[in-house]
Amino acid sequence: MPFDQTLRDHLGRSNFAAEVGIDQDERRAATAKILSQITSDELEVVRVAFVDMNGIVRSRPIEAHHFAMATQNGVPFTTALFAMDTANFIIQNVFAPDGGFGRDTLGGAGDMLGLPDLSTFRVLPWAKKTAFVLCDLYLKDGQRCPLDPRWVMQKACDRLQEHGFSFVAGIELEAHLFRVTDPNLRLEQSTQPAAPPAVEALRHAFQHLSDGAADGLDPVLSELRRAIRLMGLPLRTLEVEWGPGQIEITLDPILGVAAADAAVMLRTTVKQVCNRMGLLASFMAKPGLPNAFSSGWHLHQSLFDAERGVNAFSNRDAPISAIGRKYVGGLLKHAESSAAFANPTINGYKRLNSTPLSPKQASWALDNKGAMLRIMGYTGDPSVHVENRLGEPSANPYLYMASQIVAGIDGIANGIDPGEPVSDPYAPGTGKNLPKSLGEAISAVSKSDFFRREFGGELIDQFVALKRHEVQRFEAHVTDWEHREYFELF
């Protein structure tokens, strides 16, 4: 083999895309179009990325002139990334023959290969001559990685297609924007996890939808709007919310896996653009800062009936169709275990427990924001949909959305009746109590045969192990509340 051929095949594994059966004419044409763009835009770097189980974007920046090779051969990522919790602690022996995952193709902290999904290729408007692309993960034997959250949602969408429907999601994310006063980058502060930056508010708060507050944040929001649009995301609104520096972002409805991809890109855009402006954007549910208000992720969802070309939830005689009612029934049935995907952090439950504006019971209602599931629309409304108000903004988009899809399918397939919508969602007994902690939610999903079947036992076991390790670290930490409560008293 010529020396230059050896160099060309050095990245990934030679012709891996053909080996796994995705090297098709349509993909080659898309690759050629992107290579032309790389040349015309004089791009230098492409960040090839995937989203781990915690919802963290992991990327390898490759030289742009290697991108053609990356589309054919894949980009290697260590399997150990799936053994890291939110603080990047490795929770198992990744050097074992099975890596602690129970599968030899995940062993030894070896490589899996990421093949770029070319539909997600974007030029980053804030980074010099840099592009970004999401990839699908494959194991060394050519099988899809069972721990890849994107694959979980792809399979859920495929199952939904078998029923004649496509998933439609409208994203509504809340976040906080703060000015960094001290990044706390001294070496003694570079702990694991590191000391967070010291911040201050951009302006005073508690002026929900105030035009004055919006104008005060306009220099920042204008930059975010520009970047979001240039990323090709269908921005609908970007507005001030309740707390100091709190904002809300909504996108137009998006079909299928692209909806979760958009959520990933949206969070990445907001955080990185703000970082370059000396700001910190946080999608944490309840920051531990004075007067900081809780943030949520309200996931709007409906089903598109491809055969009839209509919203399957719309009905001319009722606020929501029979299919929609069954979908709601499935969401309610699996609310306790799916809470682990809607609220996958310890902090998420601080929001649910502390604010009266978040749901406490698994109930549904017609246009009542106190319910977990709010039906938005009216009789005959072609855009009627379900808003799940349970989630936190840092949830993994693929697992959050996939949990809704499979629960909804279960409702449709088994004709689950949600009962009548409630008039007072906070009245006792209107629905089953939702988990009050991550530990409760993890226990529920661990025992769920349904999610083991739908998501795969390997993914559920690893997700549960990661989250239990997170809970154990938290329970071993002495909080300021405990110190104040007991130190002087006893």
Image (tube, rainbow, N blue to C red):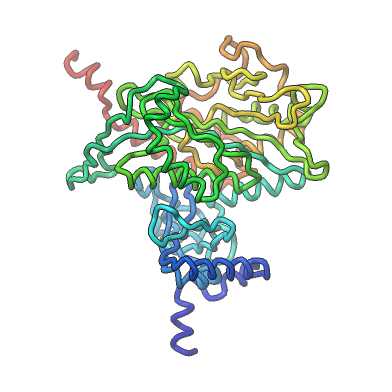
Question: Image quadrant of residue 373?
Answer: top right
The residue at 77%/31% (across/down) is 323
The residue at 70%/29% (across/down) is 384
Question: Image quadrant of residue 246?
Answer: top left
| Residue found at the very far bottom of the displayed protein | 2
Question: Taking the image as drawn, is residue 245 in sight?
Answer: yes
Spot occupied by residue 313 in the image (x, y as percentages of width and height): 74, 31
Question: Image quadrant of residue 425?
Answer: top right
Q: Is residue 311 left or right of residue 343?
A: right
Location of residue 109 with respect to 419 vertically, above or below: below
In which quadrant will I find the C terminus? top left
Question: Taking the image as drawn, is residue 462 in sight?
Answer: no
Spot occupied by residue 114 in the image (x, y as percentages of width and height): 51, 62
Location of residue 82 with respect to 354 vertically, above or below: below
Q: How many numbered dots are placed on residues in this image?
A: 0
* Towards the viewer: 200 or 146: 200
Location of residue 438 with respect to 456 vertically, above or below: above
* Towards the viewer: 235 or 267: 235
Location of residue 152 with respect to 476 vertically, above or below: below
Spot occupied by residue 67 in the image (x, y as percentages of width and height): 49, 69
* Towards the viewer: 335 or 56: 56
* Towards the viewer: 172 or 348: 172
Spot occupied by residue 409 in the image (x, y as percentages of width and height): 71, 37
The residue at 44%/46% (across/down) is 269
Q: Is residue 382 left or right of residue 429?
A: right
